[in-house]
Amino acid sequence: MFQIRTDLAVETSESRRGEKDVSGFRVETSREGDGIVITKVCIETQKAAKTLGKPRGTYISIEADQMMEEDAGYHREISDVFSRQLKQFLPEDYNNRKILIVGLGNREVTPDALGPKVIDHLFITRHLIQEYGKYLMEFDQCCSVSGIVPGVMAQTGMETVEIMKGIVGETRPDLVIAVDALAARSIKRLNRTIQITDTGIIPGSGVGNYRNAITKEHLGIPVIAIGIPTVVDAATIVADFCSGLMEQMDRTEQEDGMFGSGVYGEKSFEEMVRDLISPKLNTMYVTSKDIDEAVNRLSYTVSEGLNMTFVPQEGNVS
């Protein structure tokens, strides 16, 4: 069965926005800096959660077309915006708290290596604070940051949440932040969007490989999920191409709109795509040819934002 998958709440809300039978969620959009678009999606009711296919909670996406560019200054700006948006999910007294950051994914699979690479670039402080005290960090408002890369079930034979329960029970953090690669519906958001949510995460859900959820209900402490889409469903590319072709034919008024949206409404169009896409294509996911460089660059961007938030350095203390 044809199904376009996405981990991004902003994409799910776009597909449902304006429908009369959908209510219980809010969408707010703002802009910051040089071409950075921030979209906040609040799913407030269980009915809306069921309709949108996303858990109740708040989702913030940070989009920037230039996020793929090799511009250290621009990525620093994105890190700063990301840090400020992340703080909206944190308690007011989050300073001096114990933070466990989890890098989800498989280091051996490049599009899935975002989480592990973020952990590689983090400023880990838990062992230093335990050994020497927080004043070693020069600022008395410094979180105790620890990190873990639990791997995937094929490598460990264990569900990630099982590993996390043991670590949480032993180290007793106040908050878990899970970083993972996501799947997008739109090619334009590939490697160009950072999503933050307070709903936790289900590893592998974007590509249909569902694992047990990492949420507050399972771990007993708040879980914030951070992700960047690194893959797109191949079926989406076909659907987007067909949609663009039909829009172009509408604009040029070729064949009296025979192939345009005047004949095929949005719902009918998706049914047409279902008939055209083969089952094999519907199981394929694609990524950009420079995904290795993109993951390396974006992992620095995310880790820099996390470092700015939890281990403030002179010049970025808010």
Image: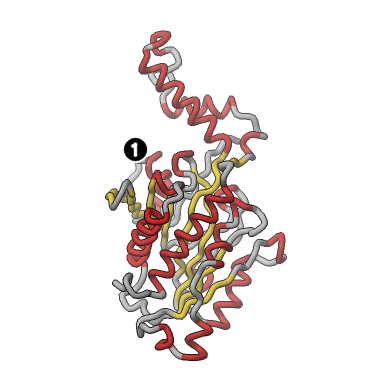
Q: Is 188 on the left-hand or right-hand side of 156?
A: left
Q: Position of residue 21 (x, y in %)?
A: 34, 40
Q: Secondary structure at mark 1?
A: loop
Q: Position of residue 57 (x, y in %)?
A: 39, 59
The number of numbered discs placed on residues in the rendered structure image is: 1
Seen in the picture, residue 27 relative to 17 is either above or below; the reply is below
Seen in the picture, residue 82 relative to 64 is either above or below; the reply is below
Seen in the picture, residue 292 relative to 307 is either above or below; the reply is above
How many other residues sit within 10 Å of disc 1, few (<14), some (14-19) or many (≥20)?
A: few
Tell me which amino acid carries mark 1: Glu
The residue under the point 49% across, 25% down is 242
Q: Position of residue 209 (x, y in %)?
A: 62, 51
In which quadrant of the rendered image does the N terminus lie? top right
Residue at label 1?
Answer: 19
Q: Position of residue 261 (x, y in %)?
A: 40, 21
The residue under the point 44% across, 47% down is 69
In the image shown, does 215 or 290 lie closer to the viewer? 290
Q: Tell which residue pokes out farthest to the bottom in this image.
A: 132
Image quarter for residue 248?
Answer: top left
Q: Tell which residue pokes out farthest to the top in this image.
A: 255
The residue under the point 56% across, 40% down is 233
Q: Is 166 on the left-hand or right-hand side of 13?
A: right
Whether residue 249 is visible to the viewer of this picture, yes or no, is yes
In which quadrant of the rendered image does the C terminus lie? bottom left
In the image shown, does 314 or 194 lie closer to the viewer? 314
Whether residue 28 is visible to the viewer of this picture, yes or no, is no
Q: Is 281 on the left-hand or right-hand side of 52?
A: right
The residue under the point 33% across, 51% down is 38
In the image shown, does 178 or 312 lie closer to the viewer? 312
